Amino acid sequence: MVPLFKVFMPDNVSDGLNKILHSGQLSYGEHTKDFERKLRKYVGNENILTLSGNSIFFALKLINIQDGDEVIVSPMSCLMTTQPIKYAGAKVVWADIDPLTGSLDPLDVTKKITNRTKAIIHYHWAGNPGHIDEINEIANKNNIIVIEDATESFGAEYKGRKLGNNNSDIVCFSFTPVRLPNAIDGGGIALSSRDLYQKAVLMRDLGINRANFRDALGEISESCDIDNVGDSTAMNNISGYVGASQMPFIEELLTKQRENALRWEQYFKSYPGVRLMTKREYVRSSYWTFTILCENRDELLIKLRKKGIYASKVHLRNDLYSVFGNKTLGLEGVNEFSKKQLNLPCGWWITEEDYDF
């Protein structure tokens, strides 16, 4: 069976692990800093930092989301995107999607804005960037923060720039096992504002300013006040090492995924009852998966499984879960997309021979 997901790990990654494990430097350290430097260079944004946990939740707390605030998001998202909104105490407001991209429909987002709207979470489906400029323009006009969810889209490009460098307020990455790169666990955020970046650095380290936290004897300085709320969410040194070790391979792996996507396009472009996602000339998907829209989705899913291709729906529309309340009516794009979308493996591990089925 050709798997939908697979964990990438460089052959030589174990070489340095033993040294780190016995160094005593297991928490945030030089290897994590090295990972962050490589991320900044790759994305083209100096305001990037790594985290040990869910980057969406961190981003929501960073912008002071509180009870009563509203956050607009698509129900066609990962639970790692939507659950943090509830966990942070805010109200989830479901917006419709463009069924040919899988991401937010700017027109419907405009309709969902109220005086309580604090943020828009812009989830990029399966590595395919959404309508970034349109969503950002709407947010700017209404003084709303945009949090891009690029957990499936690291390395994707929009108008010639990597995600994380497109002027959105916050862009969230995931470095969990089936992402590129993976750091075993954790995530990262890219920020458009240096001030917000500095706030994030303090917030992930208990509000501590390490520059003046200790005196000349290494003791905690009484003159160092802590006036920012924070948590301990910095990425550990082992995860940083694993993540940094993968960065030299990212472009090669993404190239393979894009080549595999082209093979799927050729296969399905004339396939009865199948429609391809919209392909825009100014967008380069990272192709976490290859999504097609099928009239007889479940039938094709079973057919592909029998042929050794692990096709999957991947995500269930989140407004069906009771934690969020009842299913939202009137989301026509979501209705169409959720019934038809099917995801096929097109990762770096797939060979040309795997398409002989």
Image: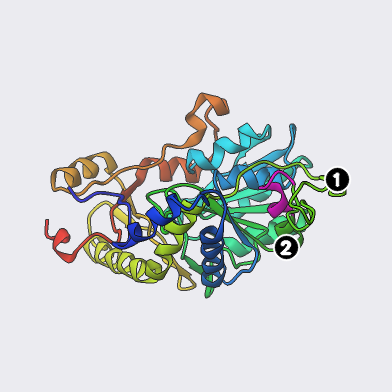
Percent of width and height locating residue 114 = 75, 42
Give the mark toward the camera: 1 or 2. Answer: 1
Percent of width and height locating residue 244 = 46, 63
User: Tag 2: residue type?
Assistant: Ser
Q: Which residue is mark 2?
A: 193
Q: Which residue is mark 1?
A: 222
**Above/below status of 131 relative to 88:** below
Q: Is residue 106 left or right of residue 334?
A: right
Q: Which residues are magenta?
A: 199-207
Percent of width and height locating residue 67 = 74, 32
Q: Secondary structure at mark 2?
A: loop
| Residue 305: quarter of image | top left
Q: Is residue 224 left or right of residue 279?
A: right
| Residue 89: quarter of image | top right
Q: Secondary structure at mark 1?
A: loop
Q: Is residue 354 left or right of residue 240?
A: left
Residue found at the far right of this picture? 223
